[in-house]
Amino acid sequence: MIRIRVTRNFDANVDRIEAFWQGLGHETAVDRLLVVIRDEVVPNLARFPRLGRAARLDAVESVQGLAAWGRVRRRLGSGELREYLFDDYLLLYLYRNDEIHLLAIRHAREAGFDLQLA
């Protein structure tokens, strides 16, 4: 059985998304997002942990971006860093030892992930 773990960073990303939607007057948008995560994303990943594609490090073009990815990889250690696209969101997760760690989530229009892995 695959265990799904939610990181503090993922929670912080959801809080940021919630503030964004509230600022636009769409208070229930984050509720819909959380329902989709609970009812669709988590069961899909639990059943098919490699459902998302491998995270594309080749898309990083700056020295700072490559250095940041290097820090992320060292912090995470072994495992598969993967991306899962659903609705208008991109989810970054780590698959390792029959566990999935939800690392970050962003709206598809955002420029990149905000990873605070302290």
Image: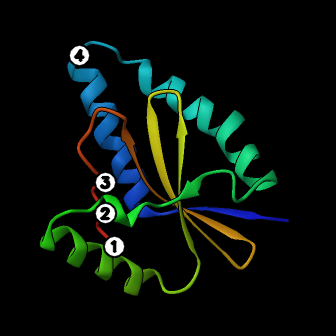
Is residue 63 or residue 46 the one in the foreground? Answer: 63
In the rendered structure, which amino acid carries the disc numbered 2?
A: Leu
- Pointer 2 and pointer 3: residues touching (CB < 8 Å)? yes
Q: What is the x, y in percent for residue 25?
A: 27, 12
Compare marks 1 and 4 and give the one earlier in the sequence: 4
| Alpha-carbon span between mark 1 and mark 3 | 12 Å
Residue that mark 3 sits on: 113
Quarter occupied by residue 20: top left
Q: What is the x, y in percent for residue 111?
A: 23, 44
Q: Is residue 117 visible?
A: yes
Is residue 84 or residue 59 the one in the foreground? Answer: 59
- Pointer 1 and pointer 4: residues touching (CB < 8 Å)? no
- Pointer 1 and pointer 3: residues touching (CB < 8 Å)? no
Quarter occupied by residue 61: bottom left
Q: What is the x, y in percent for residue 87?
A: 52, 27
| Secondary structure under the numbered disc 2 in the rendered image | loop
